[in-house]
């Protein structure tokens, strides 16, 4: 019995995660290649069989048994090279199969080095993955030896090697972190319904509970913020807003714009636009720094959100009312019908067109076309008036800029 061969095969299979049968087949093919090289007869009928239980090796050439151990040094070297190539190919196939199934899951590894902006991460002793610059959280740096958690973003097999691409910016990375930190999410008691993220800055997560007794927001935040704190620390201080999901678009938009408080929301389904009215003291909160809050809220809810002050909203309604009276002065309910459709300005009316007015509000087609035509003219007039005002504002801004003293000290 050749127990040494069996032990070698078992060790290779265990260390490199390769099926034992594949290794035995690789050994047999390597020895066949060596025998053909030794005899110089590529077309010879050579067969090699290894007993899987005992490790005993038997070789035949043209039906006659031969002693493959007597082939010499050069055939042995050939067998070794073929064997190494085949085991590497099996290992690549094993790695590709394993990590392809794990796409979207979190892995932990140690930082090895930087390569042109990408971070090489050692997942275990034999597998190295890469975290590209585009998938790194802005502002974070990683030192060699540092433990880092990432999501497996993609697995590619190119030029004889498997490339595992990691990500820390993908929205699913946040989902996976919540699954690790919040047991209720892993157990499907709480569901993440929507997520919007600007990596390194802010994330909004909309959650819903499948159990009326479980508060989804409280469960995600944890006692004294313990759960959310762990996720924020992992992301390097990125802000995370937990939003309560609601099937009502108006309620969901209200929740998504928090911490700002809004007073009114008008939904125009034809345009996919939500017009939100916020008081002056809530306007900056609703918009957020560089428009981040409203931008994430729009992505979270799927609505194009436009935020107005009460004065801007009232001015839009007044212009719309004047437009309606110019076309149909006797119909006092026309403006209310337009507002119910989510149209709160002549610009909205111009964008919507006459078809929804006929199909949704039951307005006469000729009247609808006249109404839209008047709204289009009014919208053009407003745009023309806005350009000089914008130019004046720019000039005023430039006028107050400090002038540098070019004279030498």
Image (spheres, grey):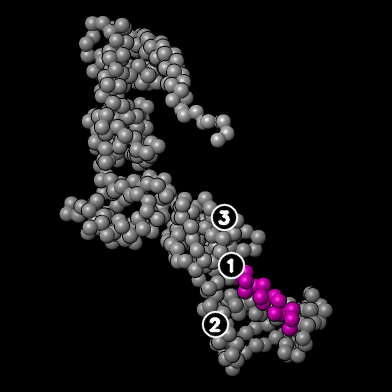
Q: Residue at x 28, y 61 (%)?
A: 183
Q: Earlier in the sequence, mark 2 or mark 3?
A: 2
Q: Residue at x 28, y 14 (%)?
A: 318
Q: Is residue 157 above or below residue 266?
A: below
**Residue 197 in picture, x, y percent from top left:** 39, 46
**Residue 321 in picture, x, y percent from top left:** 28, 13
Q: Is residue 249 above or below residue 93?
A: above
Q: Classify mark 2: helix, strand or loop.
A: helix
Which-is-in-front pick, marks 2 and 3? Answer: 3
Question: Which residue is at the far right?
Answer: 40
Q: Is residue 151 above or below residue 377?
A: below
Q: Main secondary structure of the magenta part?
A: helix
**Residue 353 in picture, x, y percent from top left:** 39, 18
Q: Classify mark 1: helix, strand or loop.
A: helix
Query: Quadrant of the rendered structure where residue 333 is?
Result: top left
In space, the residues marked 3 and 1 are separated at their CA atoms by 25 Å
- The answer to whether marks 2 and 3 mark residues whose Cβ atoms lie closer than 8 Å is no
Mark 2: few/some/many CA within 10 Å (<14, 14-19, 20+):
some
Left or right: 304 in relation to 277: right
Q: Can you say which quadrant of the picture contains the N terminus?
A: bottom right
Q: Classify mark 3: helix, strand or loop.
A: loop
Q: Which residues are magenta?
A: 76-90
Find out whether residue 154 is within the magenta segment.
Answer: no
Find out whether residue 85 is within the magenta segment.
Answer: yes
Q: Is residue 336 above or below residue 221?
A: above
> Which label is found at residue 92?
1
Observer-nearest residue: 53 or 316? 316
Q: What residue would you read off at disc 3?
A: 117
């Amino acid at each position: 019995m050749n127990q040494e061969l069996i032990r070698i095969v078992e060790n290779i299979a265990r260390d490199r995660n390769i099926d034992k049968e594949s290794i035995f087949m690789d050994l047999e093919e390597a020895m066949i290649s060596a025998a053909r090289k030794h005899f110089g007869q590529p077309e010879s009928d050579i067969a090699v069989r290894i007993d899987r239980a005992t490790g005993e090796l038997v070789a035949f050439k043209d039906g006659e048994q031969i002693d493959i151990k007597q082939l010499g040094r050069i055939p042995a070297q050939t067998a070794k090279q073929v064997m190494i190539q085949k085991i590497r190919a099996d290992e690549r196939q094993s790695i590709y199969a394993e990590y392809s199934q794990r796409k979207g899951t979190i892995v932990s590894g140690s930082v090895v080095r930087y390569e042109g902006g990408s971070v090489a991460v050692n997942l275990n002793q034999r597998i190295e993955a890469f975290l590209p610059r585009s998938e790194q959280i802005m502002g974070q740096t990683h030192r060699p030896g540092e433990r880092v958690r990432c999501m497996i973003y993609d697995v590619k097999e190119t030029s004889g090697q498997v490339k595992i691409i990691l990500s820390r910016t993908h929205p699913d990375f946040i989902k996976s972190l919540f699954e690790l930190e919040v047991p209720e999410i892993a157990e499907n008691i709480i569901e993440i319904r929507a997520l919007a993220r600007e990596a390194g800055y802010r994330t909004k997560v909309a959650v819903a509970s499948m159990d009326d007794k479980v508060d989804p927001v409280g469960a995600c935040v944890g006692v004294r913020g313990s759960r959310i704190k762990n996720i924020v620390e992992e992301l390097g201080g990125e802000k995370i807003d937990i939003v309560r999901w609601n099937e009502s678009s108006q309620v969901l938009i209200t929740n998504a714009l928090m911490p700002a408080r809004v007073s009114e929301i008008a939904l125009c389904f034809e345009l996919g636009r939500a017009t939100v009215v916020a008081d002056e003291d809530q306007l900056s909160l609703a918009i957020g720094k560089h428009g981040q809050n409203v931008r994430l809220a729009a992505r979270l809810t799927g609505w194009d959100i436009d935020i107005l002050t009460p004065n801007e909203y009232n001015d839009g309604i007044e212009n719309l009312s004047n437009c309606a009276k110019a076309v149909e002065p006797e119909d006092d309910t026309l403006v209310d019908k337009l507002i119910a459709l989510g149209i709160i300005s002549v610009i909205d009316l111009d964008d919507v067109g006459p078809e929804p007015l006929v199909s949704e509000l039951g307005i006469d087609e000729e009247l609808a076309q006249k109404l839209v035509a008047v709204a289009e003219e009014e919208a053009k007039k407003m745009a023309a008036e806005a350009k000089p005002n914008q130019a004046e504002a720019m000039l005023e801004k430039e006028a107050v800029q400090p002038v540098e003293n070019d004279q030498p000290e």
